[in-house]
Amino acid sequence: MKNLRMYLTTALMLAIGLIMHSFVPGTLGAMKFDFTLGFIFIAFFLYPNKENAIAVGIAGGLLTALTTTFPGGQLPNIIDKIVTVFVLYLLYKLTEKIMNKKIQVIFLSFIGTIVSGIVFLGSALVITGLPAPFTALFLMVVLPTAIGNIPLTFIVYTAANRAKNQINPQKC
């Protein structure tokens, strides 16, 4: 039953992220502010295990590939989400015993978004090329997204975690 709850919660978080991602317009170089990442992070933080990390990375990458406005951005989206969640998992394991959970969520959502942006831009550069300079895309899209993902991830994670903890496992 716990796995079913984990997968349903993960699917719900990814669906919300997909909806947000599909309505965010492309900005500089048709690159979007990727708030799907916030929901990918939330899904992971709610169930921070290797199995969920793999599922979230693959599913999140496929879903963002479907809604990208970046020319040729499908494969870079898949690559970046898988790499990002792997890095997130490793950083989570390294910091879980030394960092307060709230600080950890804030820190890892920022770092995770930066990792995602660098991997996306790097893989897009190699695979299709970039429509604007790497530095401009990083400063104008990745960095603001990383800053925006902090409150988004923290607020939604806090609410979702509280709701998760209110559920009586015997009734599910």
Image (tube, rainbow, N blue to C red):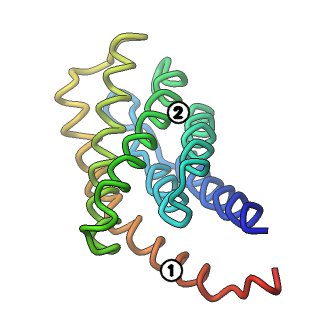
Q: Quadrant of residue 6?
A: bottom right
Q: Amino acid at mark 1?
A: Ala
What numbered label is drawn on residue 15?
Answer: none
Q: Which residue is mark 1?
A: 159
Q: Which residue is mark 2?
A: 68
Q: Residue furthest right?
A: 171
> Alpha-carbon distance for marks 1 and 2?
28 Å
**Three-letter residue code for mark 2:** Thr
Q: Which residue is found at the position 77% from the left and 62% from the top?
A: 4
Q: Secondary structure at mark 1?
A: helix
The C terminus - image quarter? bottom right
Q: Position of residue 44 (x, y in %)?
A: 51, 57
**Secondary structure under the numbered disc 2 in the rendered image:** loop
Q: Which residue occupies the foreground of this view, 103 or 89? A: 89
Q: In percent of the image, x 47 and y 71: which residue is there?
A: 157
Residue placed furthest toward the front: 97
x and y percentages locating residue 114 in the rendered image: 28, 43
Q: Are marks 1 and 2 in contact (CB under 8 Å)?
A: no
Name the spot of residue 131 as percent of width and height, x first.
32, 18
The one of 72 and 165 positioned closer to us in this rendering: 165
**Above or below, comparing residue 53 to residue 76 in the picture:** below
Q: Is residue 121 left or right of residue 13?
A: left
Q: Is residue 160 above or below residue 60?
A: below
